[in-house]
Amino acid sequence: MVMSPFIKTMSKVSSIKKTLTALPIIKKQANVSPLVVGDDLALRSGLTSPVMYDKEIVKLIHDHIEFADEEDNSKMNYPKFISSLSNVDKLSLLWALFKSTYETLGERDFKCPNENCEHSKTPFKEEVLLEDIIHEDTYTIWEEETPFNEFVHQVDVPYENMIYSFQTRLPSIKDNNRLLSTMSNDTLQTNLQQLGSIFSRSQNMALLVKAVQLQPKPDSGLDIETVQSDNLQEILMAFNSYMPLGVSDIALEKYGEKFDKYFTKFYKTANCPICGKEVTNDFDLEVEFFRRSLFG
Ligand SMILES: [Zn+2]
């Protein structure tokens, strides 16, 4: 198509507002351009299910991204993009997409931690800009020599007569999307409303685990064969219905020791206008995105 001067100028202006962001896990940098009116339609058509919505978001990010190193742009098609970027990198891109499009998350409630203060009951409001929620500890660069999508960290949890072994990982965009494909809109809505998160505990564990093995302790005297699974549906069902809470507590704790530092920390600290006490609010941009779309 030949671009008229009008279209050329519109296109130029829309690309000025690009936001540069770091992709800490794949150790690259990328520019993200703002959402345009046509993107809104794409997002709305994705509202049929969580997995479709996630796919639409990721497609939009893929359309709006330009790697700082030009060579990466030519080889990063969509399938490669979702398997070679971690979900943490996606959050950084989501931040940049929000920043270039809206600049602000709007006014938010802050609840004072001081029990004697009026604002512990009636929260005060403060505007939260995207640039406010980024801090020095928001991103941690991937430290392992193996790329994140090939890296597995084994977590063993001896429990009663058994040993539960988890092959844990940092999930990719694709892993995240696969898990969403097992969920209905109702489940997502329930999770968001009751837990304030996208995934329940067992779903979250299934996301962090590539495979599970169950074997009796050598001295247990149990006649149980060692079994394992890397099937998502099987793992989900097993975690939900049969995994002792005590095992998941220990597994998640051990997982956290290895991986927690990599998860993005978006937060804003404000001072209570009455008593001056500091209040910190955390923001989950993925939850923000789903909330915006599901509840308007
Ligand atoms: Zn206060």
Image (spheres, rainbow, N blue to C red):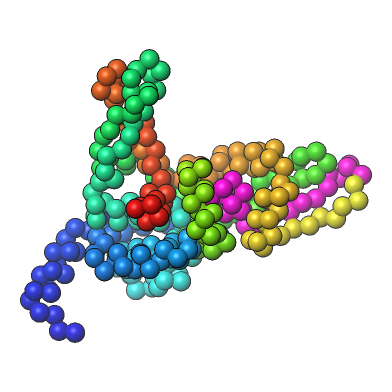
Membership of 220 in magenta stretch: yes
Rendered-image quadrant of the N terminus: bottom left
Please provide percent x and percent y for residue 231: 67, 63
Q: Which of the pair 202/150 is nearer the observer?
A: 202
Residue 112 in view (yes/no): no
- Residue 35 lies, with reference to residue 274, above or below; the image says below
Residue 191 placement (x, y as % from top left): 52, 48
Taking the spot 80% from the left edge, 38% from the top edge, the residue there is 160
Query: Which residue occupies 33% across, 20% down?
Result: 118
- In the rendered image, residue 159 lying in the magenta stretch gets the answer no
Q: Viewer-proximal residue, 237 or 173?
A: 237
**Picture coordinates of residue 9 (x, y %)?**
10, 70
The residue depicted at 72 percent of the width and 42 percent of the height is 244
Residue at 27% in and 39% down: 107
Q: Is residue 14 above or below residue 275?
A: below
Residue 167: x and y in percent read: 65, 53
User: Observer-nearest residue: 161 or 285?
Assistant: 285
Q: Which residues are magenta?
A: 198-221
Location of residue 70 by image quarter:
bottom left
Query: In the orientation shown, which residue stands out farthest toward the bottom?
Result: 1
- Horizontally, residue 242 falls left or right of residue 294, namely right
Seen as rendered, the residue at the extreme top is: 116
**In the figure, is residue 40 to the left or right of 176?**
left
